[in-house]
Amino acid sequence: MPDAVLRAMHRASPNIYEGELHDLTDSLIPDLKAVARTAGEVAIYIGNGHAAWEASLANVCTPGDMVLVLATGRFGHGWAEMARGLGLTVEVLDFGQQDAVDMEQVTATLKADAEGRIKAVLVCQVDTSTGIKNDVDAVRVAMDAAGHDALLMADCMASLGCDVFEMDAWGVDVMMAGCQKGLMTPAGLAFVFFNARADARHKASVSAWWNWRPRVRPAMFYQYFNGTAPTHHLYGLRVALDMIKDEGLEHVWARHATLSRTLWAACDAWGTDGPLRLNVPDAAMRSHSVTSIGMGPGQGDALRHWCEHQAGLTLGIGLGREPADAWFRIGHMGHVNAQMIMGIVGTIEAGLIACGIPHGQGALRAAAKVIAAG
């Protein structure tokens, strides 16, 4: 989290009935849409990614409706579980934990749905557990090739503001994300973006809490959040969006791409003589926000523990791969720069040495060469 964001949140509680908080909240809407690259609507919820999952489904689906989930990791399956909990019928195409969505399978599945039972196709642009990046644009192409009119819904929790995402140009009907990660604000706000096509399928039966219509067309400020505003998060988010705007979204994307390649170059060097390996073999399918890395049983947890308790570097736990203690993840998203990445590489190398984990040499040099090349 940038210090500027945290400083903006460190303030007395503001007046929620009138004044600057109202103007600040109004100013967030066009800038959130700009990050999502959409002229559609955005509803803000007090909640996390699971809240956004439920909101995205509750507004356009009713019990008994069918959705198709394209899973490439734990969080794709999590969205499917949320759908089942809402009484929806769920079909899952599971592409494993190392490969992206196969578009031919998507097209074939939708073509087989001659009765049009599938109401929505759900896909994570990036699954946080595996670090797999899916081609959301190609999913829309596959859906169009099948002649299917299902809604395309994308989970961008781990990718918004990190990987290239073009909601309108790619034909995404509903997209959900959160204020953490790429948007650099402490967790607590969830966003659901939607276009006119999705709103045309809005269900009148949706609960007052999840209903996105009052939130995007509020008759009074209170309706933005169906209750008291998340005051301090709004101040932090305002600064974070200003930082993205000042840098330029295209530059933000390019920065994440360069820093990702820097990290991967180090991993390739370590992997030349030892067990360390990237979860996703194909670089084109790797996220620019999170990387999943495997080693031998127990080695992932040992490295994480050393890095955190001896060097102050927190690495993510292994998710989606077995044994979990052989894996760890690196989040390189949002407020991150070359200095941080080089520090991560150096700390991990020290940890590999301290833990006695075999590894190849030259990781720091390989990473430096990527940074130098820009």
Image (cartoon, rainbow, N blue to C red):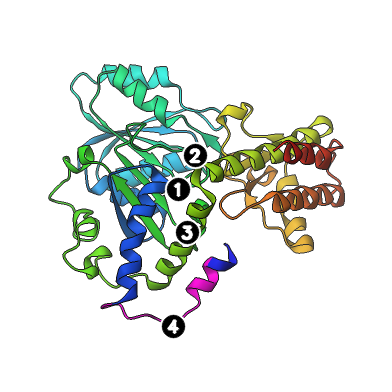
Which residue position holds label 2?
126
In whole angstroms, how far apart are the C-alphas of marks 1 and 2? 8 Å
Amino acid tagged 3: Asp
The mark nearer the N terminus, 3 or 2, is: 2
Say above or below: 200 vs 145.
Answer: below
Mark 1 or 3, closer to the camera? 3
Which residue position holds label 1?
157
Callout 1: helix, strand or loop? Answer: loop
The mark nearer the N terminus, 2 or 4, is: 4
What is the x, y in percent for residue 111? 28, 17
The mark nearer the N terminus, 1 or 3, is: 1
Q: Residue at x 26, y 70 (%)?
A: 227
Q: Residue at x 38, y 26 (%)?
A: 139
Mark 4 burial class by Cα count in 10 Å: few <14, some 14-19, many 20+: few
Mark 3 burial class by Cα count in 10 Å: few <14, some 14-19, many 20+: some
Which residue position holds label 4?
12
Q: Badges 1 and 2: C-beta atoms under 8 Å apart? A: yes
Which range is magenta?
5-18
Callout 4: helix, strand or loop? Answer: loop
Is residue 220 something that shows in the picture?
yes
Which residue position holds label 3?
242
In whole angstroms, how far apart are the C-alphas of marks 4 and 1? 29 Å
Viewer-proximal residue among 249 and 360: 249
Q: Quadrant of the C terminus?
A: top right
Viewer-proximal residue among 28 and 345: 28
Q: Badges 4 and 1: C-beta atoms under 8 Å apart? A: no
Amino acid tagged 4: Ala
In whole angstroms, how far apart are the C-alphas of marks 3 and 2? 24 Å
Callout 3: helix, strand or loop? Answer: helix
Mark 1 burial class by Cα count in 10 Å: few <14, some 14-19, many 20+: many
Say whether residue 118 is left or right of residue 205. Answer: right
What is the x, y in percent for residue 127? 50, 40
